[in-house]
Image (cartoon, grey):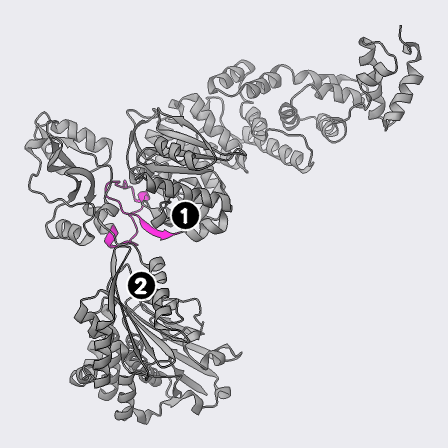
Amino acid sequence: MEVVTTHVNADFDTIASMVAAHKLYPDAVLVLPGSQEEMVKGFLLQSAFYALEVRRAKEIDLSRVTRLVLVDIRNSSRIGVFAEVAMRPGVDIHIYDHHPDEEADLRGSVEVIRPVGSTTTILVEILKERGIPVTPDEATVMMLGIYEDTGSLIFPSTTVSDYLAAAHLLSCGANLGAVSDILAKDLTSEQISLLYDLIQGSRSYNIHGVEVVIAEARREEYVGDLAVLVHKLRDMEAANVLFAICQMGDRVVIVGRSRRPEVDAGAVMREFGGGGHAYAASANIKDATVFQVKEKILLVLSDKVIPRRTAADIMAAPARCADAESTVEEVHQQLTRFNINALPVLRGGETAGIITRQIVEKALFHGLGAEKAAEYMNSDFESVEPGEGIERVQEIILGKNQRLIPVLSGGQVAGVITRTGLLRFLHGVRELPPPDAGENIPEAGLVARQKNVAHLIRERLPEEVVDLLRSAGTVAERIGMSAYVVGGFVRDLVMRIDNLDVDIVIEGDGIEFAEAFARENPCRVRPHHKFGTAVLIFPGGFKIDVATARVEYYLKPAALPTVEYSSIKQDMYRRDFTINTLAVRLNPQTFGELIDFYSAQRDIKERALRVLHSLSFVEDPSRILRALRFERRFGFIVGKHTLNLIRNAVRLDLIGRLPKPRLFGELELILREQDPVAILRRLGELGIGPSIHPKIALDRKQLSLLGDTSEVLVWFSLLFLEEKVEKWGVLFLSLLDPLSTEEAIAYAAELGVGRRAREWVRISRYEADVPIQRLLTSRAVSRKMIFDCFNPLPNEVILYMMAKTKHADIKRYISLYFTQLKNVRPQVTGKDLLSLGYVPGPDFRRILDEILERKFTGELKTKAAEMSFILSHFPQKQGRS
């Protein structure tokens, strides 16, 4: 048996959907799983459509159901007894729905789920596509469903598809007069009384800047069509967000309506076991009081309501401003330096006008570079205060075509809002144009796409680190600053990679924040006043780096940047790649809010590495090495445009212009990666080797040595020895292998490597060959000889020798040294020899060497055996003189 059913408390959209679905499944039985709204109930009783034999669930044998067609629902918690049927093996489920996804959603063999205004629209489209005729009466019922769920096609959820479906139904003979009469039915005396009580029981709450009206009433008996009353109450109270709570007998009915994007009524109702859309939803609760429900709604709203956005939320701050006395040429340099397109112009500290790049460039074209910028600024402009709503911003930018708005606080410029910033806010999930299309990403006015990752922070970080992050936000809030955790830490958090390298950026003064934080937490501060940074050092060695939000610009290619304090938006813009531009707010009210100005989430999802602008590698060529390192580490692909920029930078030999210590810093990080040889091979493919040093070709021969070195290091790690080795150092020796001895030693010094690494280079060139020649030329090689040859050398040099040598015997000797000889030592000590009466001197060494030789052969295994050996083989030294 086939059954078409829907959710309990059916409305007109569900009934209309059932009628439409019956035309697709003509042999199916229409079954209502539970109650209906009063208007729907009256319609079914008075309409000819009750002849369709719409049955109740108890009237059919549920065990015979083989196919379940669900319309306007897929949440198993809202289909009554049919939830058990849906879970039964062998039951075929077909779903037609327009509601958002929920955790309890069923899955079907047929699923038609579209974000339109009503489910009826989906089914009408299918009927139209298949050419199935619809009678005028059927069209009228279907029109009822569309009109009810879309508010007669004026709700924000209404789509083009709803209009087209309604037009098709009109062409089929739908009676709009009948639709209007049914939907505009007069209220009964009970409904009027209930509406009055709801009005009297209404109270307004300000939740995160959003005005929410909650109305409550109580009735002993059930009163139908509460949704209709809520619509009327919303219009009468001019409420954008309204929740009506009504006790009816033993249950509480909640109806929610929202016309604000900050409040998702459906999400709120799902917390009560109900459901619906962002703009309209409901729930039924048993065994609860109005007071209990109201208190829970307030708690849920506090968690669910997105804070109302104001000018302060989307402005870029601090604002870059031009002085009225500046020349046009000076303003042009400022626009270029900070990569922005418009500036407020100040005269005597007050905003006098706005000047744009377009005007500046035209003035330069006409030879007016030496003229005052104030002569060409636009002095007819509007401004806003930080607390003004987005609506006012929208009116100025879109209505008055003003591309930049100064945000004034106490008459001073606190920030600016750009046209691009507003549009990105209004279309919050819109993708930014990919940088790999060859476009720069403008910083000014960017508004981030946001979601909350507080749950990820709690799940993936140790509790003590979570507490420190919350404390950082609390301290920043108290001293009037904003705190963010940023960079690789956030990137890895989103990618579910462990990383406790915490970097905090402060909009304000990073050092002042660090000192305030240290007064309330067990840590000490190491400030760096020159850079506005600090390190928080905790007991046990855990550290948090703190920086002041800043912007960087480069006076020439590959130079160190000039730094100025700025905003989190501009701070993120100075980063190397989009994937490293994520930030998470730490201040209490917005804790865990993920900020994504430059499509980092998109690039992480697409596994793409992209720079933020086309001059990125010109400004800092070290980013090339970092890009190839990240490409291998994360399994990403360098974007097409970014790869072209790398090739151009290599052609210009920009890496060769880097200060050598900075170059070595990036090389060391590459050599410390899990698969450094693959990264070096990629460098070779792009011709980067000679930029490191003219003799480092990273060609087949050198990559072969590097590959052998990597294999040796893998072998060494599999020995599970307690011996430590700096694997990067072994690879570094192989990287310098093509250089002559003098060149390698000089280049290591030029790179600024540490003293130990420079010593490895010296030993590998001057001392390593001696033991090899000794071993190769000796007629008999003993274990003691092998030990004596290798023991004076650092492990790093020995492993480099093992990778480089072509002699199998040398490889075997080194293997024997590490696995059996290196940690062999006599158990007797100098004190033991003194206790036996031996006089300190050269004989001490001869005795210990002899013991070591016998231990290598396995003759002496215990300390007692060693003592006995000494007494029997060196008797002439016994006794004190």
Reading the image, the residue beneath label 2 is 264
Residue 7 visible at all? no
How many residues crowd mark 2 within 10 Å: few (<14), some (14–19), many (20+)?
many
Residue 668 lies within the magenta run: no
Instruction: Give the dominant element type of the magenta stretch: helix, strand or loop.
Output: loop
- The residue closer to the viewer here, 667 or 149, is 149
In the image, the segment drawn in magenta is 425-452
Q: Tell me: residue 320, above or below residue 308.
A: above
Residue 437 lies within the magenta run: yes
Q: Which quadrant would the C terminus be assigned to in this image? A: top right
Residue 364 locus on image (x, y percent): 11, 30
Q: Tell me: residue 653, above or below residue 770.
A: below
Residue 246 locus on image (x, y percent): 31, 75
Q: Is residue 246 left or right of residue 702?
A: left
Reading the image, the residue beneath label 1 is 604
Q: Is residue 880 left or right of residue 496?
A: right
Q: Is residue 823 left or right of residue 422?
A: right
Which labelled disc corresponds to residue 421?
Answer: none
Q: Tell me: residue 56, above or below residue 92.
A: below
Give the residue type at disc 1: Ile
Question: On the image, which quarter does residue 442 sit in?
Answer: top left
Question: On the image, which quarter does residue 712 sit in?
Answer: top right
Label 1 sits on a secondary structure element that is helix
Label 2 sits on a secondary structure element that is loop
Q: Residue at x 7, y 27 (%)?
A: 371
Q: Is residue 500 left or right of residue 182?
A: right
Q: Residue at x 49, y 32 (%)?
A: 669
